[in-house]
Amino acid sequence: MKELNDVIVSKAIIKEYMDDLLDYTEMDVAIGGGGPSGVTAGYYLAKAGYKVALFERKLSIGGGMWGGGMMFNKVVVQEEGKRILDEFNIKSKPFQDNYYTVDSIECTSTLCSKATQAGLKIFNLMSIEDVMIRKDKINGVVLNWSSVEMAGLHIDPLTVESKAVIDATGHPTEIAKIVEKKSQKNLNTTTGKIIGEGSMWADRAENKILENVSEIYPGLYVTGMAANAVHGSPRMGPIFGGMLLSGEYVAKKIIQNLEK
């Protein structure tokens, strides 16, 4: 084996990472949150040829899917969502009519792998702490290291530009909350505000999620559990068909709007 130089290893990592970060200071779509809906949205946008990056504050990508239901690493997907599993070549097992069980580890890791291979750029350990609003439209996001946030340090962030932003932060609806607070404009909901999620009700939540995937402020879209929470629908629990379908659907909506 040839001799290795530790400093060259460091130089390779620093240069390649900085090249990526510089490249994605301008992009088509920025996604906040690396759960299944955000990753799926990134996959379909990248597959369509758009320059898209996903920012996740945690070390791992996949949100709550890793843990399945109450740490039983199985999840359920209904019939409508199975075609997305099939597209990703994720194995599923019929349980009874309209219910398929999926290994949550295989599902999460495969979604991440296929999305990055399609061209989605993922930056983990980064938090979106603010948005860039210009002429009453979201034009980008403001980033900081999640370790800075966790340590409570006073470190100024940096801004990246995008034509659209997706809030895929799940239950907390973090980006939508920033916009609600700072824009001083009504959101595109029945109250003009974030309504908040209801109690868990899988049937109602899954059937409302595509209706809730929407542009709630010019340039800002919600998907996954963030869409249900913003619009006041129930949470769905460990069934993930709606999460996958909402990621695909928000990508389609953005593509249609960007092509106009």
Image (spheres, rainbow, N blue to C red):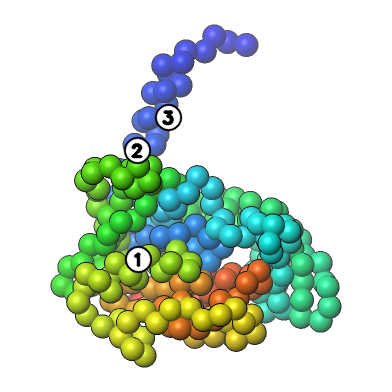
| Residue indicated by mark 3 | 13
Left or right: 131 with respect to 233?
Answer: left
Q: Is residue 163 above or below residue 229?
A: above
- The percent coordinates of residue 251 (x first, y second) are 46, 70
Q: Is residue 107 visible?
A: no
Please tell me which residue is depicted at 60% across the width and 78% down the height of the picture: 200
- The percent coordinates of residue 79 (x first, y second) are 72, 78
Q: Secondary structure at mark 2?
A: helix
Q: Nearer the viewer, mark 1 or mark 3?
A: 1
Residue 51: name its quadrant.
bottom left
Q: Earlier in the sequence, mark 1 or mark 3?
A: 3
Left or right: 77 with respect to 168?
Answer: right
| Residue indicated by mark 1 | 175
Q: CA distance from mark 1 to mark 3?
A: 30 Å
Please tell me which residue lies in front, 116 or 208.
208
Q: CA distance from mark 2 to mark 3?
A: 10 Å
Label 2 neighbourhood size at 10 Å, few (<14), some (14-19), many (20+)? few
Left or right: 129 with respect to 167?
Answer: left
Q: CA distance from mark 1 to mark 2?
A: 26 Å
Left or right: 225 with respect to 71?
Answer: left
Q: Secondary structure at mark 1?
A: helix
Q: Amino acid at mark 2?
A: Asp
Q: Is residue 241 above or below residue 13?
A: below
- The percent coordinates of residue 7 (x first, y second) are 41, 16
| Residue indicated by mark 2 | 19
